[in-house]
Amino acid sequence: MTMIIGSWPPPSMVEVVLPTIEGALKNHQLLSKKLQDFTNPPSGSTALFPLNAKVWERMQNVKLLTARLIANRKLLTELAYQDDQLRPRKRIRYGKLPSKRLQVVRNKEREANEQMKLDMESLFIFGNLLLEQWTYVIHYLIGETNLKERDFSKLVTTLQSKQNNGLLQPLWDNHYEDLIWLYYQLRAFRNIFIEHIKSPWQNGTSRETYGDSFRLATPSPVGWIDEVEIEKKIRKIAYLAPQWAKRNPAVWNQNNIRQLLEVIFYHIDGVGDRGKQEKVWEVWRQVGGWTPSYDMIAFRLMRFMAQSLLTMTDVITQHPEVIAVGSAPLRTSSE
């Protein structure tokens, strides 16, 4: 596949992702301190504080997975250099095994790659759990204790569809790009391509030989959808591509058509309204492709957490009276 020249591929976030996670953890402590200051929970069980503790736990899960991914990606680069050094310069005779040292290096490469694949899939799963848990806490912070149909998906679609979101308006105004991006890139992708697989997606990985990137590769296999039909589907939404891509002649090359879809999907948070975003997702859901690198997934997730924690801290600072701690219902003696 020819690489599109322009604002692609996305930049590496390896150097900033762990500091971003630490910032999110620090901001969570700030929110927790405010909750202690603003509430006087009764003795006995409450819902808000355990739910908020679960947010902390899930952020720690993401931190662990991200640190492990970074470490294994560095290892893969080191092993690639070793592989290059040990690889024979002359073509070896068919049937002859590589040297034992080279076999050891390649076995380590396979193991590290499989570990990264597992950890990246886990990043999607636990990242989604974090978003769900944080959504529950958000609703308690604004006094809503009925969590039926209050998941992250419902939060995003509700905020996007309404003109006035009350106390949650700052959440949408300040973070709508991350909310939309995570809704599709993390939650929707996890649903269709990791947990509820119903089509024969290819199941692999993609990375630079020497570099930081590591991505999941889940394109539809050759022949599952006719390539002519794939091109038609992508060209129908090509007008939603970012401006730099529209001005680049290489984008319209037939050989780049799947990568054009990748570019459009990656920039879905800049695609107008929900109807247009759903058109992009529908094509991606049918055709599949390559995810952003693990470091970008973790960065966008934890940047949202770090910043939205501050937003909600500001909301409860201005409106501490609305916080619901979710006390256990009183029981009568007859019960």
Image: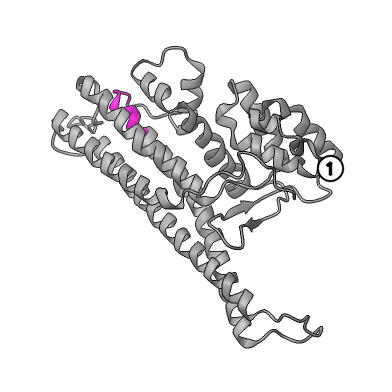
Q: Is residue 138 magenta?
A: yes
Instruction: Classify 145 as above or below 300.
Output: above
- Range of the magenta residues? 136-144
Q: Which residue is mark 1?
A: 227
- Mark 1 secondary-structure assignment: helix
Predominant SS of the magenta segment = helix
Q: Measured from the top left, where is residue 302 in percent x and y? A: 40, 42
Query: In this view, which residue lies farthest toward the top?
Result: 163
Instruction: Classify 41 as above or below 105.
Output: above
Q: Could you tell me which residue is drawn at 44 percent across and 41 percent down?
A: 301
Colour theme: one colour
Instruction: Classify 217 as above or below 104.
Output: above
- Amino acid type of the residue that numbered disc 1 sits on in the rendered structure: Glu
Q: Measured from the top left, where is residue 207 in percent x and y? A: 61, 57
| Left or right of 35, for residue 90 | right
Q: Measured from the top left, where is residue 230 in percent x and y? A: 80, 38
Residue 317, image quadrant: top left
Q: Could you tell me which residue is drawn at 82 percent across and 33 percent down?
A: 232
**Neighbourhood count class around disc 1 (C-alpha, 10 Å): few under 14, some 14–19, many 20 upward:** some
The answer to whether residue 106 shows anywhere in this view is no
Q: Measured from the top left, where is residue 246 in percent x and y? A: 70, 29
| Left or right of 270, for residue 258 | right
The one of 77 and 34 positioned closer to us in this rendering: 77
Q: Tally the numbered discs.
A: 1
Q: Could you tell me which residue is drawn at 24 percent across and 25 percent down?
A: 316
Q: Quadrant of the C terminus?
A: top left
Residue 189, image quadrant: top right
